[in-house]
Amino acid sequence: DSGVTQTPKHLITATGQRVTLRCSPRSGDLSVYWYQQSLDQGLQFLIQYYNGEERAKGNILERFSAQQFPDLHSELNLSSLELGDSALYFCASAYDGITYEQYFGPGTRLTVT
Amino acid sequence: ELKVEQNPLFLSMQEGKNYTIYCNYSTTSDRLYWYRQDPGKSLESLFVLLSNGAVKQEGRLMASLDTKARLSTLHITAAVHDLSATYFCAVDPSNRDDKIIFGKGTRLHILP
């Protein structure tokens, strides 16, 4: 158990819908990273937040957005969903500046039908 | 744009043998990560390599980083079946205009 929690574990929804994925980092970790894993694209970095502020942006689509709240949990919002958005979404947390080691949550499996 | 090439993509080997997975990347990097992923599971951090010449070892796995050659290796010594998994490298570039890029992964199958 990495100490990172993600909810929900599974999500099935229809095209055009909007969903929110939630991530709670390990206690004390200030950074949250979001990743997408699909058979087509492999593992892709989406976005990083550090202590509430966006720090780095990866391959995040404009239909997707994220934020990190004052209690350091993070949410990834996916809207106007398409079939190709079906994937595993992982978040990871880290105490950047010391080891940079990232601890991954169990993931949310999103299926868009 | 940062490119990361990992090879081999698939490796089947006998228990007790040694082998190396390679991770080449195309631009300067601040950090290089190695991860393990078991089927249907999340990623587990194995190593974070921060500087040229860095070498880290954990059990039968050893990772090294040569920033001049833009190459990292993950060496497996005397492989055991429990090491069967997919291994990914990921590069965090120095250029802030680039982004973290993962290799395609090496699927390692160790035969008992």
Image (cartoon, rainbow, N blue to C red):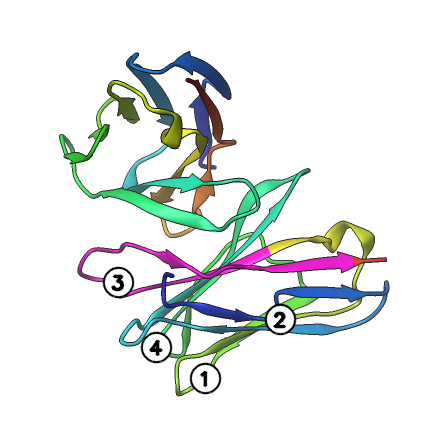
Report the amino acid beneath label 1. Answer: Phe
Say which element carries label 4. Answer: loop
Spatial CA distance of label 4 from label 1 is 8 Å
Q: Which disc number belongs to residue A96? A: 3
Q: Are marks 4 and 1 on the same chain?
A: yes
Q: Earlier in the sequence, mark 3 or mark 1?
A: 1
**Chain to which the residue tagged by mark 3 belongs:** A
Residue highlighted by disc 1: A69
At mark 2, the secondary structure is loop
The residue closer to the viewer here, A96 or A2, is A2
Q: Which residue is mark 2?
A: A8
The image shows residue A6, relative to residue B17, as above or below, that is: below
Q: Is residue B29 left or right of residue A98?
A: right
* Residue A51: assigned label: 4
Q: Chain of mark 2?
A: A
Instruction: Name which residue type carries label 3.
Output: Asp
Give how far apart the Cα atoms at labels 1 and 2 are. Answer: 18 Å
The tag earlier along the polypeptide, 1 or 2, is: 2
Among the 4 quarters of the image, the one containing residue A80: bottom right
**Image: magenta residue range:** A89-111
Q: Earlier in the sequence, mark 4 or mark 2?
A: 2
* Residue B5 screen position, x and y as percent: 45, 25
Is residue B26 in view from this perspective?
Answer: no
Which amino acid lies under the numbered mark 4 shown in the image of this protein?
Answer: Asn
Q: Are marks 3 and 2 on the same chain?
A: yes
Task: Tell me which amino acid carries mark 2.
Answer: Pro
Residue B23 falls inside the magenta stretch: no
